[in-house]
Image (tube, rainbow, N blue to C red):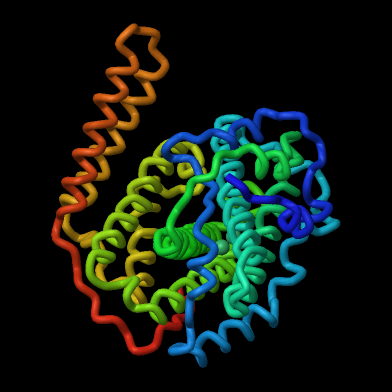
């Protein structure tokens, strides 16, 4: 891994803790479990060759939106909210902190990747886009850190950037995975925001007030990848259709399992993880029709049955990991293999073919 950090450090400026002392939350963010948010690196030379000329008008309109920077002063904790907001229900405490840590890790992972692409490519379109997106993600990550400090556990972003393992992904995989995570990020934030809008008494922490404008940033990031893919249609045909299916299922299944590990958090929001995920996946599926040639059939009962079986296997795996038997490793590997089989079974369920719309751009209406 040869990602240099100066550019990201400049971006984060004073938001970054300079201390190298490893606190427990930084440690948690460093974990490289299958379900934890990852950091990525890619082939920058290939990104340099991306052409978006065929969609120039839509692209330029998007760049004007970024330039306008309507959320410029949104991600600041207001002076009248400087009291300690860490006094959440004790039952909720660990899961909420875990939620914040995994959110900050994803935001920061995006920030690092985008900043590095900007730094390493010469293609002006790509430099401009990734510069704007790194700006947004650094604000998001910095903002979460401002609230995490109430809990006495601010994440050391500089340390995290230098120490966390980076996964190499070809550019096309970055487009599929990042497009999906931006759009699913939008769907997640807006679904929570709407729930709390309906029932304001459920807002146990002020951070939810920021989710509406926040999710519009994520929506716009997703739009950028949609344009890149639609301007380069080879990314969406032939064998790539099978890769797209793979990424959709991987992202959906990961979310399903991870959300079920936070039952108290969803109880506090008066929505079950299963219902929440169904809503989020419905929205994401609807959005991805703008660019992906296929969507998974969420109405096929075998789809959620498969996710439920994967979830049950993960729960067993967690229980086995806590045991101290000599065959623990074999047992975990066996359960892992069964997850793989279940994944393949769901992967080969019939999917829906999409007739792509003529215009790529979409507005968030959820
Ligand atoms: Fe973000
Ligand atoms: Fe984003």
Of 325 and 1, nearer the camera is 1
Q: Nearer the viewer, residue 318 or 203?
A: 318
* Relative horizontal placement of residue 247, taking residue 117 as reference (left or right): left
Image position, residue 16 (x, y; %): 78, 48
In the rendering, at what x and y percent does residue 340 appear?
24, 38
Q: Is residue 331 left or right of residue 257?
A: left
Relative vertical location of residue 58 with respect to residue 314 in this rendering, above or below: below
Viewer-proximal residue among 199 and 234? 234
Is any part of residue 198 visible from this angle?
no
* 74 relative to 282 in the view: left or right: right
Vertical arrangement, residue 313 with respect to residue 40, above or below: above
- What residue is at 42 percent from the left and 16 percent from the top? 322
| Farthest-out residue, bottom | 57
Q: Quadrant of residue 23?
A: top right
Quadrant location of the N terminus? top right
Residue sitting at x 50%, y 35%: 32
Residue pictured at 58% horizontal, 66% vertical: 212
Within the image, what quadrant is residue 156 found in? top right
Asked whether 357 or 247 is in front, the reply is: 247
Q: Residue at x 16, y 53 (%)?
A: 348
The C terminus: image quadrant: bottom left
The tally of labels here is 0
Tell me where residue 22 appears, x and y as whole percent.
71, 29
Query: Can you see residue 245?
Result: yes
Task: Locate ligand 1 by image quadrant.
Answer: bottom right
The location of residue 49, given as percent across then percent down, is 50, 74
Image quadrant where residue 143 sits: bottom right
């Amino acid at each position: 891994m040869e990602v240099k950090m100066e550019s990201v450090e400049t971006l984060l400026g004073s938001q970054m803790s300079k201390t190298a002392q490893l606190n427990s939350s930084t440690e948690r963010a460093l974990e490289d479990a299958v379900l934890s948010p990852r950091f990525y690196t890619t082939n920058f030379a290939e990104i340099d060759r991306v052409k978006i000329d065929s969609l120039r008008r839509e692209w330029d309109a998007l760049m004007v939106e970024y330039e306008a920077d309507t959320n410029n002063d949104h991600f600041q904790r207001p002076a009248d909210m400087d009291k300690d907001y860490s006094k959440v229900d004790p039952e909720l405490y660990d899961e909420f902190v875990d939620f914040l840590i995994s959110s900050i890790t994803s935001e920061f992972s995006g920030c690092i990747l985008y900043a590095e692409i900007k730094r390493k490519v010469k293609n002006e379109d790509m430099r401009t886009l990734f510069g704007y997106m790194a700006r947004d993600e650094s604000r998001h990550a910095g903002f979460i850190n401002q609230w995490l400090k109430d809990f006495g556990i601010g994440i050391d972003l500089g340390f995290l950037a230098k120490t966390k393992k980076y996964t190499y992904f070809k550019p096309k995989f970055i487009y599929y995975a990042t497009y999906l995570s931006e759009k699913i990020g939008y769907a997640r934030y807006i679904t929570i925001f709407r729930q709390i809008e309906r029932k304001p008494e459920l807002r146990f922490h002020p951070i939810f007030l920021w989710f509406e404008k926040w999710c519009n940033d994520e929506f716009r990031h997703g739009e950028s990848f949609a344009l890149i893919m639609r301007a380069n249609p080879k990314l969406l045909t032939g064998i790539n259709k099978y890769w797209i299916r793979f990424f959709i299922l991987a992202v959906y299944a990961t979310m399903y399992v991870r959300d079920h590990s936070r039952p108290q958090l969803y109880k506090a929001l008066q929505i079950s993880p299963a219902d929440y995920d169904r809503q989020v996946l419905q929205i994401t599926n609807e959005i991805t029709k703008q660019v992906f040639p296929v969507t998974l059939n969420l109405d096929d009962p075998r789809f959620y049955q498969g996710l439920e079986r994967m979830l049950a296997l993960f729960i067993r795996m967690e229980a086995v990991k806590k045991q101290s038997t000599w065959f623990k490793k074999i047992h975990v590997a066996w359960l892992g293999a069964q997850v793989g089989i279940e994944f393949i079974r769901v992967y080969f369920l019939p999917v829906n073919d999409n007739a792509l719309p003529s215009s790529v751009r979409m507005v968030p209406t959820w």
